[in-house]
Amino acid sequence: MSEDSEWTWLLEEIKLLKRDWKVFEASHISKIELERLQLLSEGLMLKEIAYKQGVSEWAIKQSIVSARKKLKAKTSAETVVIFTRYKIYKALWVYIQ
């Protein structure tokens, strides 16, 4: 990979991070949805999250579906990707400041 293509790739990733940050900020994700997305992004299964939070697996699924709709994501996996990009962009923004 040439140096120019590496920079192009990095700039595209930054654009995606910024886009997802704006989408996330405008989505009004609830605190509980954030907590559940965090656990999902850490690799926990729905059943594990439900057990950890003392709720049903159905309640976890509904939170993820709600977050997915708010973020206009097509799948739960895309929801987690948007959430992860949001966390990265937010961390970078704090670092840059």
Image: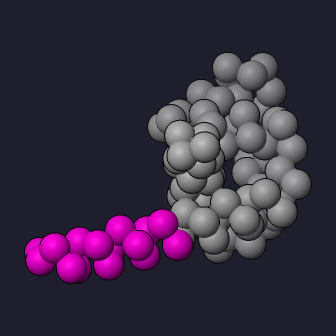
Q: Does 86 appear in magenta?
A: no
Task: Quadrant for residue 91, please give it.
Answer: top right
21 in relation to 30, above or below = below
Residue segment shown in magenta: 1-15
32 in relation to 1, above or below = above
35 in relation to 4, above or below = above
Task: Quadrant for residue 4, please give it.
Answer: bottom left
Q: Quadrant of the N terminus?
A: bottom left
39 in relation to 29, above or below = above
Towards the viewer: 39 or 83: 83
Identity of the residue drawn at 50% across and 35% down? 42
Give the x, y percent position of residue 7: 29, 72
Identity of the residue drawn at 59% across and 28% down? 48
Residue 86 appearing in the image? yes
Identity of the residue drawn at 68% across and 22% down? 51
Towards the viewer: 10 or 28: 10
Give the x, y percent position of residue 97: 60, 43
Does residue 34 appear to the left or right of 42 in the view shown? right
Query: Which residue is outermost to the left?
Result: 1
Give the main secondary structure of the magenta stretch.
helix
Towards the viewer: 33 or 19: 19
- Colour scheme shown: one colour
Give the x, y percent position of residue 24: 74, 59
| Badge count | 0
Residue 77 appearing in the image? no
Identity of the residue drawn at 57% across and 53% down? 89
Query: Which residue is outermost to the front?
Result: 97
Task: Quadrant for residue 41, please give it.
Answer: top right
Does residue 65 appear to the left or right of 96 in the view shown? right
